[in-house]
Amino acid sequence: MENSETTTRKKRGRTPAQEAKILERGRRVFELRRSGVSLRKISEHLKREAESKGESTRGFSFSQVRDDFHAVLEVLADDTQDLAREYRTLTTETLEELLTAWLPYSRMQITNRSTENDVRLKMKSGDVIVKAVRELAEIYGVKRPQKVEMSGLDGKAFQVVTAISIEPVASTIPKPEIPAEDAE
């Protein structure tokens, strides 16, 4: 059975060399966009560059450049997700091994005959276990919400000032006529 990349390539009729060229173009679009150049300007730049080399300007339209940019963003997002998932898996395995190793020491019974080393080992195991469980809780997203206090300058409370601006507006309602007082 073929993988999806090979199947996609065959559907579109692209060779591996063409795919590489498209990926390189997408990488260049991404780098230019990251430096602050608009997609429209990137399209114009790549067209001029291709013309100067005597190559076809096909594939450098604004819509194609936009599609290339979004394709690169999707690949980067997938790569980032894969790295994060791998990191979580490795960290979780390490912490679980740590818990497995230290749990017996935390369950150790301390009696009058216990050595000072046994007492220190039990105390150390408690610290290690608490830290490992906190880390696992953070990885699994079950950490309780953090309380955050905010303040203004010099640690004082914020001062909220509300200003109301009233500007005259031309009215379309006719003003009532005021009758003149009769002079007698």
Image (cartoon, grey):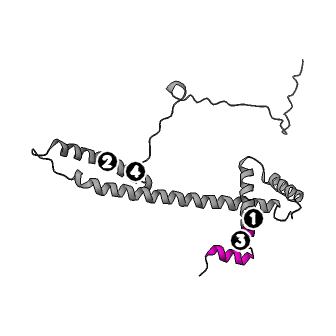
Point out the residue furthest to the bottom here. Answer: 1
Within-10-Å neighbours for mark 1: few <14, some 14–19, many 20+: few
Within 10 Å of disc 2 (Cα), the crowding (few <14, some 14-19, many 20+) is some
Q: Which residue is mark 4?
A: 135
Please name the residue shown 33% across and 54% down the image.
98
| Distance in Å between CA atoms under marks 1 and 2 | 52 Å
Any mark on residue 16, and which? 3
Tell me the mark number nearer the camera, choosing from 1 and 2. 1
What amino acid type is highlighted by mark number 2?
Answer: Val
Horizontal side of 130 relative to 4 (left or right) equals left
Which amino acid is tagged 4? Answer: Glu
| Measured Cα–Cα span from mark 4 to mark 3 | 44 Å
> Residue 16 in the image: x percent, y percent?
71, 71
Mark 2 or mark 4, which is nearer the start of the sequence? Answer: 2
Q: CA distance from mark 1 to mark 4?
A: 43 Å
Q: Nearer the viewer, mark 1 or mark 4?
A: 1
